[in-house]
């Protein structure tokens, strides 16, 4: 239910996270079709007219980029993530569709019904707004701001999204064995606080379009134009005030900025207008005396706003968030208007995502570890896990060797780093123990009811963790997901079965290509344990400095080099009077550090593997040396096209750099690249001075 994670997990890419956001869409006649096989090493993608030493991304991906325009239902089209994501979703759809038609187990009946309810658009039309009316009636009855805690808890107990703030149970940053209550800012409907606050022509226009969107949605829901205008203004005013009070994404990357332990009594003193004991008591969580308030300033402002804004404004705000939070499950008129603003205007998407894709993803979100059980049986053979275990072990060895030879680190810190590395745990494929969803009642004729019951289940599952031991076997991604992550509080790396397929991992290809693709992915996740954020946690997952003061200083000098390097890259070129959008070097620092470390240690692991097989890095296949195949295999993971709108949005909200810079930013920091392609020093991909952290 809560999208904001207090102890952030560090992903490989935003692609899947984007696909899992309820994308704007409604009925679509597009028929599912089997996707094509994906080549692990694609000679036809290479643009031989480009000089690899000048622009390696263009060389490796140029022809692919030219020949693969973005499909209408996408905002980003990537050779690896999108193609494999579409393939996995198609396989998932086949399973869901079969289960919806003739289930052969109670589990299949449950996810088959969930999927069928989502696909039944004629019933969605017939029901109109009826499914959200009970929530709106409760909001209409609000007569005093003092009733807000009781109203919010009632809505949340019913599984209704209200958008006020994020509250969850999570690991204590300073004692990872403890699970504590945590609360953080929330309440915005635009992608980032900047959208409300930045004074530029582009954002001023987006804000005006957002207010128009609010008006249209309220009008569709039955308001007169005058009422709708008033409600839209009230929502915009509250959200803008909350945006001003919000901590920026960049500042939230610093763990200390999101760790503030308060007793409930002290927290209450800072926010007099909202009765926390009443709220905490009514949402059905166990007793607790203290909590982590990630963003204290936000709650002070929220409290002051509750006192200054009139009750009708809060009613408008809540009506909007209830509507917006489940709009993809409402009738077509609402879908279309939502798509028009969030899809077309904000992200440059031309057509809505077909319904079958929407419903496959929605079922995966709600019942992922039920759907995943059959999925892994069919798509993840045991030998794939064995091969991955071997690959991970070879990368662990390389990172260990790398740490030993780091030029800037003292022996004491090296020892601490090695200890942390030894404690990293690996999770590969799917959970050892599947979650039990049997308590979620799924009704084939009640799409929104299913959504609410799933939300309540997730919330209760999370609240039940309070004060309990941590379950280290738990997963944050479902098996078909094309992504991977490192969790600093667990100190573990996680690779769902969904990414352990071509073009990332291919049993039939030479090791250089596999090391360039999945090898770098594994190295990337391991390096997250040692990036600007992950390096502040020790091997037990506790926020604790383990570097000497001098080493931390040297570390920061080196990460500052990457901040400046990536901060000079353009995410979107100037367009008319809209200026170019540069990357945020600080927001993307952790991911860039992970990419750089991953490329280096996977290369070292490849050398070891080739040596063990009696081969060398200079052996040739298809006219390319193993070293060249390694770098091309790596680069081709990141071939992509993206709409200008999505590129600009990502530059503000996504901690990952775009494909071009994940490739060029990384290879220019690694000497072995220049050697592999015979680049003279001074060429863009072989600069005389480059950045290195790990
Ligand atoms: Zn990452």
Image (tube, rainbow, N blue to C red):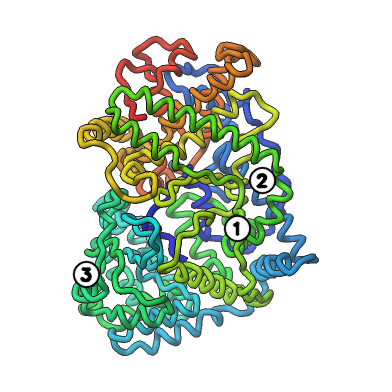
Q: Where on the picture, by quarter, is residue 151? A: bottom left
Classed neighbour count for the residue bearing mark 3: other residues with Cα under 10 Å, few (<14), some (14–19), many (≥20): some
Distance in Å between CA atoms under marks 2 and 1: 13 Å
Distance in Å between CA atoms under marks 2 and 3: 47 Å
x and y percent of residue 430 in the render?
61, 51
x and y percent of residue 315 in the render?
35, 81
Classed neighbour count for the residue bearing mark 1: other residues with Cα under 10 Å, few (<14), some (14–19), many (≥20): many
Name the residue beneath numbered marker 1. Answer: 361
Mark nearest the camera among 2 and 3 is 3
Q: In what element is the residue under mark 1?
A: helix
Classed neighbour count for the residue bearing mark 2: other residues with Cα under 10 Å, few (<14), some (14–19), many (≥20): many
Are the residues flagged by discs 2 and 1 in contact, CB closer than 8 Å? Answer: no
Q: Where on the picture, by quarter, is residue 372? A: bottom right
- Horizontally, is 49 left or right of 591 in the view? right
Closer-to-camera residue (77/351): 77
Mark 2 or mark 1: which comes first in sequence?
2
Mark 1 or mark 3: which comes first in sequence?
3
| Residue 579 appearing in the image | no
x and y percent of residue 3 in the render?
43, 60
- Horizontally, is 256 left or right of 371 in the view? left
Answer yes or no: disc 1 within 8 Å of ligand 1.
no
- Horizontally, is 298 left or right of 678 in the view? left
Mark nearest the camera among 1 and 3 is 3
- Please state the quadrant of the image where ligand 1 appears: top left
Task: State the residue at coordinates (43%, 86%).
Answer: 138
Residue 136's place in the image compared with 84, above or below, is below
Distance in Å between CA atoms under marks 1 and 3: 37 Å
Q: In what element is the residue under mark 3?
A: helix
- Horizontally, is 613 left or right of 12 in the view? right
Name the residue beneath numbered marker 2. Answer: 87
Name the residue beneath numbered marker 3. Answer: 300
């Amino acid at each position: 239910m809560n999208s904001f994670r207090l102890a952030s997990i560090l992903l490989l890419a935003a692609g899947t996270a984007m696909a899992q956001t309820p994308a704007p869409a409604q009925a679509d006649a597009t028929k599912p079709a089997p996707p094509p096989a994906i080549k692990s090493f694609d000679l036809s993608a290479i643009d031989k007219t480009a000089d690899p030493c000048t622009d390696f991304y263009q060389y490796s991906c140029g022809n692919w980029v030219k020949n693969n325009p973005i499909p209408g239902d996408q905002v980003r089209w990537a050779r690896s993530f999108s193609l494999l994501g579409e393939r996995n979703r198609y396989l998932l759809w086949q399973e869901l569709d079969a289960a919806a038609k003739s289930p052969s187990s109670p589990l299949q009946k449950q996810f088959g019904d969930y999927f069928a309810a989502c696909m039944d658009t004629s019933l969605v039309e017939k029901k109109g707004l009826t499914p959200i009316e009970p929530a709106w009636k409760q909001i209409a009855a609000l007569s005093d701001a003092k009733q807000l805690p009781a109203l919010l808890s009632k809505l949340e107990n019913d599984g209704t999204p209200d958008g006020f703030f994020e509250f969850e149970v999570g690991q204590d940053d300073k004692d990872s064995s403890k699970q504590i209550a945590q609360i953080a800012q929330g309440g915005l409907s635009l992608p980032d606080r900047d959208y409300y606050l930045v004074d530029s022509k582009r954002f001023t226009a987006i804000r005006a379009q957002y207010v128009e969107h609010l008006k249209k949605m309220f009008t569709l829901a039955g308001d007169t134009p005058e009422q709708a205008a008033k409600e839209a203004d009230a929502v915009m005013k509250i959200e803008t005030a909350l945006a001003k009070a919000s901590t920026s994404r960049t500042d939230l990357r610093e763990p200390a900025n999101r760790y503030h332990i308060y007793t409930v009594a002290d927290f209450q003193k800072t926010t007099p207008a909202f009765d926390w004991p009443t709220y905490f008591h009514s949402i059905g969580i166990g007793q607790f005396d203290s909590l982590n308030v990630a963003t204290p300033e936000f709650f002070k402002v929220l409290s002051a706003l509750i006192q200054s804004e009139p009750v009708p404004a809060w009613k408008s705000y809540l009506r909007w968030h209830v509507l917006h939070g489940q709009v993809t499950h409402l009738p077509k008129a609402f879908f279309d208007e939502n798509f028009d603003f969030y899809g077309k205007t904000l992200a440059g998407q031309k057509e809505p995502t077909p319904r079958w894709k929407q419903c496959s993803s929605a079922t995966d979100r709600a019942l992922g570890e039920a759907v995943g059980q059959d999925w892994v049986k069919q798509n993840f053979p045991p030998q794939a896990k064995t091969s991955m275990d071997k690959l991970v072990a070879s990368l662990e060895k390389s990172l260990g060797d790398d740490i030993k030879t780091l030029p800037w680190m003292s022996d004491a810190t090296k020892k601490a780093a090695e200890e942390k590395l030894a404690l990293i745990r690996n999770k590969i494929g799917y959970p050892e123990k599947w979650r039990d969803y049997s308590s979620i009642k799924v009704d084939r004729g009640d799409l929104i009811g299913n959504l609410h019951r799933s939300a309540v289940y997730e919330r209760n599952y999370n609240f039940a963790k309070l004060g309990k031991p941590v379950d280290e076997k738990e997963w944050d991604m479902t098996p078909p997901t094309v992504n991977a992550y490192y969790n600093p509080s667990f100190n573990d790396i996680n690779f769902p079965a969904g990414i352990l397929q071509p073009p990332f991992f291919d049993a039939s290809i030479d090791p250089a290509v596999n090391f360039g693709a999945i090898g770098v992915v594994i190295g990337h996740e391991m390096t997250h344990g040692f990036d600007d954020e992950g390096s502040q946690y020790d091997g037990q997952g506790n926020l604790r400095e383990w570097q000497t003061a001098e080493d931390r200083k040297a570390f920061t000098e080196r990460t500052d080099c990457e901040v400046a390097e990536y901060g000079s890259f353009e995410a979107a070129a100037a367009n008319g009077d809209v200026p170019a959008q540069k990357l945020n070097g600080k927001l993307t620092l952790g991911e860039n550090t992970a990419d750089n470390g991953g490329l280096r240690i996977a290369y070292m692991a490849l050398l070891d593997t080739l040596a063990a097989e009696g081969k060398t890095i200079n052996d040739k296949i298809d006219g390319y040396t193993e070293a060249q195949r390694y770098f091309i295999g790596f680069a081709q993971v990141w071939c992509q096209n993206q709409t200008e709108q999505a590129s600009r949005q990502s530059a503000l909200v996504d901690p990952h750099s775009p494909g071009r810079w994940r490739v060029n930013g990384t290879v220019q920091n690694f000497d072995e690249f220049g050697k592999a392609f015979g680049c003279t020093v001074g060429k863009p991909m072989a600069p005389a001075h480059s950045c290195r952290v790990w």
